[in-house]
Image (cartoon, rainbow, N blue to C red):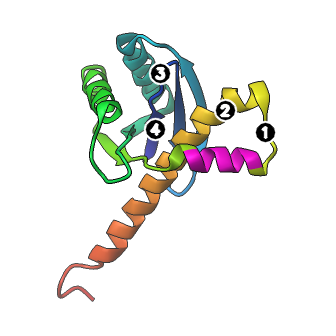
Amino acid sequence: MRILAVDLGGARTGLAVSDENEVLASPAGVVAERNRERLARAVAAEARRRGAGLIVVGLPRNMDGSEGESAKKARAFAGLLRAQVSLPIVMQDERGTTVTAHNYLNDTNTRGRKRRAVIDAVAATIILQDYLSSRRRDAASTGPPFGAE
């Protein structure tokens, strides 16, 4: 199943998409929209265009795990998105993803306008890759049903 991830931002929102096998996350662009209703419609349209079966929205928790104002905004956006699509929407802890994205871009010497243009999509890609990894871990930990050979 193809999965779309969203890194909600104030002015720009990053998107990432997985392959059908749910192994690899790739950047899928940035939506420059401040109005949350229009943004939800744009993300829903992108999910349909890409044939997504699930949407992951980054949840910006505080470092202690609590949820502040940014997390409330992300949950509210997920609610707006639910009104636009009939797909499951899950929230994924995104602590540290922006720092990791900046580190990746530092490693590739991506600077200036180019950096601003891709940072949100890179953060969405990290959110999605973390989600894909957690799905694989969860599937591996459950193993075969009891008594199965």
Question: In the picture provided, is 26 more to the left or to the right than 91?
Answer: right
Would you say the residues marked 1 and 2 are in contact, meaning their CB atoms lie under 8 Å apart? yes
Q: Which residues are magenta?
A: 99-106
Q: Residues within 10 Å of mark 2 (few under 14, many from 20)?
A: many
Kind of residue indicated by mark 1: Thr
Q: Which residue is mark 1?
A: 110
SS at circle 3: loop
Task: Estimate the x, y position of residue 119 in percent, counting from the top left.
Answer: 63, 35
Task: Estimate the x, y position of residue 43 in percent, counting from the top left.
Answer: 44, 23
Would you say the residues marked 4 and 1 are in contact, meaning their CB atoms lie under 8 Å apart? no
Viewer-nearest residue: 79 or 55: 79
Would you say the residues marked 4 and 2 are in contact, meaning their CB atoms lie under 8 Å apart? no
Q: Which mark is residue 77?
A: none
Question: In the picture provided, is 138 more to the left or to the right than 43?
Answer: left
**Spatial separation of the CA atoms under disc 3 and disc 2:** 15 Å
Up/down of 41 relative to 130, above or below: above
Q: Which residue is mark 3?
A: 10
Is residue 98 in sight in this rendering?
Answer: yes
Q: Which mark is residue 118?
A: 2
Q: Which mark is residue 4?
A: 4
